[in-house]
Amino acid sequence: MTSSLALGSLPWDRERARGIALRLLSVAIAALLVSAGTAAVAAIGARRHVIVRTLPGFERAVEREITHLGGQVGIELPIVNGFVATIPDSSLPALNEDKAVVSVTPNGRLTFSSTYDASGDPYSLHNVAASIRATNMWQAGYTGTGVDIALIDSGVVPVQGLLGSSNVINGPDLSFESRSADLRYLDTYGHGTFMAGIIAGRDNGAVPGAYANDTADFLGIAPDARIVSIKVADSHGNTDVSQVIAAIAWVVQHAQDSGLNIRVLNLSFGTASVQSYVLDPLAYAAEVAWRHGITVVAAAGNAGTTSGGLADPAYDPFVIAVGAADNNGSMQYSQWNVASFSQTGDGIRNPDILAPGAHIQSLRDHGSYIDQTYPGGMISDRFFRGSGSSEAAAVVSGALADMFQQHPSMSPDQAKGLLIGRGNNLRPPAGFGPRQGQVAIRLDTVMSAPVPIAVQTFTPSTGSGSLESARGSTHVWVDGNQITGEEDINSQSFNAGAMAASEAAGNSWSAGTWSGNAWTGGSWNGNSWSGDSWSGNSWSGNSWSGNSWSGDSWSGNSWSGAYWG
């Protein structure tokens, strides 16, 4: 039972990876632990003990170069494409110029760490929050209080940073794992937990009113907002467009249930739809949410300059399409650039806003598929690092929660106009103009500006097109049979026109039934969500092997960059 919508996370591009001081990260062969110190490489006479990381496949060539330069190669570290070495000081300039070398970092003493000094990492989430001036909003009292963000993703697990009962509540589990009581709601893939941390993470020790200067506690962009987690993806990130449409419809119908106030919907994925947004059922579902007062944030995609257009539903002009920027660890917008992987528009529909999406620190989901498959992304026993338009979208979703606390009656059109109108222009990449996006998020100017008069007048989607075209090249297998054409994962006919009418009327969900099919994994009663409790007080990651659906297969893996590091 599989498929894939594009969840955005990419490996560090080489140029940026070489530019980052990985002094916080040392590698223990068995454990990948965080370095205890951040001092410069310890010199022994004129020689240094270091860890050298290379581009994949270049380890032997760099080892030969080090030997030629008078160094000695030690133990191999294949898990990070690297090795330990002792090098003369005189070799450092040559190694820094070698394009095959990703980093040369201290080989320091290693310890397990459950804390993280955000001030020492230019890409820590605290420094990302400071770079977009979210800390200015925190100082003014706008931390997302009272605002719920719907996160349609792979679920969330209760790791430290998401333990408070006010951080996360569960919506329905619409994934293939919903049938399993041990896996229901929980993030076996690792992506949803990472996004939830960016949006609204908060360590229990963080003190309200003192967030802006707190570099010892992990804090998301909207630390007092709440995540409503709707799980659609399994342990390999597999889901179908029909599951996501059902999830969006559920959010629309339950956004203002007793105790809920869903104002933002985060969609950190997308498909390569082959039809216009005017017809596309996924884009239509996103528009319905928008018209019901929910600001939809969608990742632009990670295909760089090769795509010819944004991912679906980001290509719908009503929603907020988010591209990724690399802030280069700087508070100065003049030092920012558009990330090389951030997807280009077609020249007409381009990313609306850019947000930091390179090398972002967030919460690690122990034992998840991403955690097991991409150990190079580990910062410590609590934190992971990833890049992609997914991360950028999560940053914007958190920012919007802060904005909605300040302006509770603001419409989605107004929120979009305020965000874009008060952003900071970046120099566009050579040859692509604004097609990769040009306006970067800046919350100090947003906070000080009045809410604009804004009404979008694009041609609305009808949703009457093809479910199969919305999938692009990705497909689900159920019990060995590929789901194709106008058929949902329950092997039921998908009538796009009838579904569009039902979504517009707000009745596609009736109790636990969507489009006439019962879904497991939720507790809802009529039109009111009863609120599944946030399960567990801690997470050890031992409830699954990371291969819960290893017998299934899929094609056209379009999760937007399932690489972390």
Image: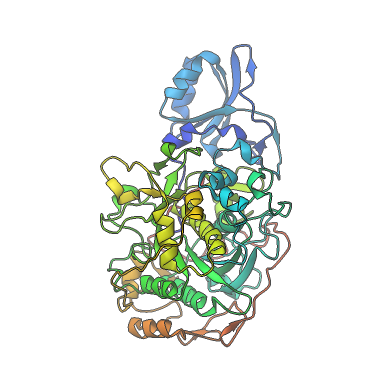
Between 400 and 63, the one nearer to me in the picture = 400
- Whether residue 222 sits left or right of residue 206 in the image: it is left
Q: Residue 498: x percent and y percent?
A: 36, 86
- Whether residue 273 sits left or right of residue 10 in the image: it is left
Between 337 and 140, the one nearer to me in the picture = 140
Residue for point 68% across, 65% down: 166
Whether residue 5 appears in this view of the structure is no
Q: Residue 294: x percent and y percent?
A: 47, 70
Q: Residue 404: x percent and y percent?
A: 53, 64
State which quadrant residue 427 falls in: top left
In the rendered image, the vertical position of residue 134 relative to residue 349, given as above or below? above
In the rendered image, the vertical position of residue 149 relative to residue 523, given as above or below? above
State which quadrant residue 178 falls in: bottom right
Residue for point 60% across, 78% down: 522
In the rendered image, the vertical position of residue 410 relative to residue 13, given as above or below? below
Between 493 and 523, the one nearer to me in the picture = 523
Q: Residue 240: x percent and y percent?
A: 43, 70
The number of discs equals: 0
In the rendered image, the vertical position of residue 366 relative to residue 411, given as above or below? above
Between 34 and 125, the one nearer to me in the picture = 125
Residue for point 44% across, 57% down: 419
